[in-house]
Amino acid sequence: MARQRIAGLVASALATLTIGIAPVLAHHSFSMFDQATPLTITGVVSGVEWTNPHVYIELDLVEPIKGAKHWSIELGSPSILQRGGWKFNTVKKGDKVSAVVSPLKNGEPGSLLTRITLPDGRVLGNGGPTGVGPGTTAPPAATPR
Amino acid sequence: MTIPRIAVVLCLAVGVGAIAHAQSSAARNIGGAWVPMGGGRGADPKIAPPPATAIVLKPTYAAAQEARRAADAERTRRGEPPPSPAVLCLPYGMPRMMTVASYPIEILQTPGQITIVTEAFSEVRRVYLDQPQLPIDEVPPGYYGRSVGKWDADTLVVDTVGIKESVPSYNGLVHSDRMRITERIRLVTPDVLHDQITIDDPVVLEKPFTYTLAYRRLPNYEMVEFVCENNREYVDEQGRVRMRVGGAQK
C-alpha cells in the first residue's frame, strides 16, 4: 500500500515535471524533415497550391537531386505567409526560382521551405512572426498541428 | 434645496454615471482581432502572462501520460511524428483552440452573446451571457461544449462544460467528461488581452491547474479563411505521419 502510494507520488511528480511548464504553442511536428541538412533546389514552378493547411509549390528541377527531377515544397499556411509578407500570387507557374529547403528524411522528393529567391531577386522566408520582412528565415512554419 | 441646486446635483450625478459607464464600456471592449503573444525572457512583465501552475494528474493517468509522452518523443526523434487530430484536419476544440501557433482569433460582442472565431480551422464558440449553465450530463459532448459568461466588473468570466473526451486538452492532456473550464478574460491594457484558463477535472486531476494566454490587438485585421482542403499529410499503415509528394490529389 505504502509502495503504491510512493509510486503514485513519483508518477505525479513526474507528470508535474514533464507537463507542468509554461504554455507551449501548438504546432506541426517538423521532425519528418531533415532541418540539419538544407538543400538548395532550383527550377521552374509547375504549380502553386495556395491552400490550407499548407501552401505547396511544385518545382521541376534544372538538375535532378537525389534522382528526382520533380520536387514538392511545403510552406506555412496562407495566414502565416500573408503576415510574413507573401501574397497568393507571389509565386506563379512558370517562375524560375531557387529555394533553400529541408528535405524529407525518408528520401522522397518532398521538402519544407526555409527561404525562396523569386525571379525579381526578392527573398522570402516561410512566414514567421508578424512584421518579419523578406529575407528573414522564419522558424519552422507555424502551422497548426 | 432650491430648484437650481437640485438641477446641478442631478447633472453632476448623471455626468459621473456617464463617465463611469464609458470607462466600464472601454474596459469591456474586447471585440476585434487578437494575435497570441508569447511570454518568456524579455517579455514586458506588466503584460506578460504569468506562468502556468503545476499540472498534477492522478497516478493512473500520470503513468499513462508519461508513457505516451516518452513514446511520442522517441517517434519524433526518429523523424516519424505521431499523428494528432489536426494532422487529419480535425479542429482543436476547447481549450486548445484559444491558442494555435500565431493564428489570430476574433471576438464579436453582440447583445447577450460573445462569439469567438479562430483563424486556424475557422472554429467558432458562443458564450451566452447571463444564462444559467446546464448540468454537464445535459450538454451533448462536443468540441466546444456549452459556454455561459457574465461580467465580474471588467472581467468576463466564462464557464464551459461538455467537451468530449476525444478532444485533447491543454498540451494534449487527456481529460474526462467531467472537465470544467473556467476563463477569466480581461484587458490588461486597451490593446492587451489575457485569458486566464483554469481546468478542473476531478477524475483525471489531483487539483485544478491554471494557465494564462495573452493576446495583442490587431487593429483593422481581416481574418483569413481556413478550409482544410489540401491535406497532404497522412498516416501510413504503421501510424507514421507522411507527406504525399507530387501535387494535389486528383
Image: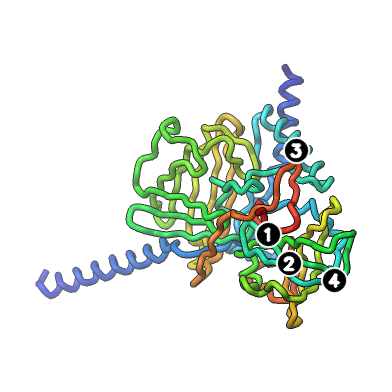
Q: CA distance from mark 1 to mark 4?
A: 30 Å
Q: Residue B22 is drawn in which quadrant?
A: bottom left
In the picture of the structure, the residue carrying the numbered disc 2 is: A138
In the picture of the structure, the residue carrying the numbered disc 1 is: A142
Q: Residue at x 65, y 45 (%)?
A: B171
Give SS at disc 4.
Answer: strand
Q: Residue A60 is drawn in which quadrant?
A: bottom right
In the picture of the structure, the residue carrying the numbered disc 4 is: A62
- The reply to whether label 2 and label 4 mark residues of one chain is yes
Q: Chain of mark 2?
A: A
Q: Are marks 2 and 1 in contact (CB under 8 Å)?
A: yes
Disc 4 residue crowd, few under 14, some 14–19, many 20+, Cα 10 Å = few
Q: Quadrant of the N terminus of chain B?
A: bottom left
Q: Are marks 2 and 4 in contact (CB under 8 Å)?
A: no
Foreground of the two, B206 or A75 = A75
Between tags 1 and 4, which lies in front?
4
Give SS at disc 3.
Answer: loop
In the picture of the structure, the residue carrying the numbered disc 3 is: B237
Q: Which numbered disc covers residue A51?
A: none
Percent coordinates x, y for residue A50 in the rendering: 63, 65
Q: Is residue A117 left or right of residue B94?
A: right
Q: Is residue A35 left or right of residue B9?
A: right
Q: Residue A16 is drawn in which quadrant?
A: top right
- The reply to whether label 4 and label 3 mark residues of one chain is no
Give the amino acid at mark 1: Ala
Between tags 1 and 3, which lies in front?
3
Q: CA distance from mark 1 to mark 3?
A: 27 Å
- The reply to whether label 1 and label 4 mark residues of one chain is yes
Foreground of the two, B53 or B31 = B31
Percent coordinates x, y for residue B125 in the rendering: 46, 50
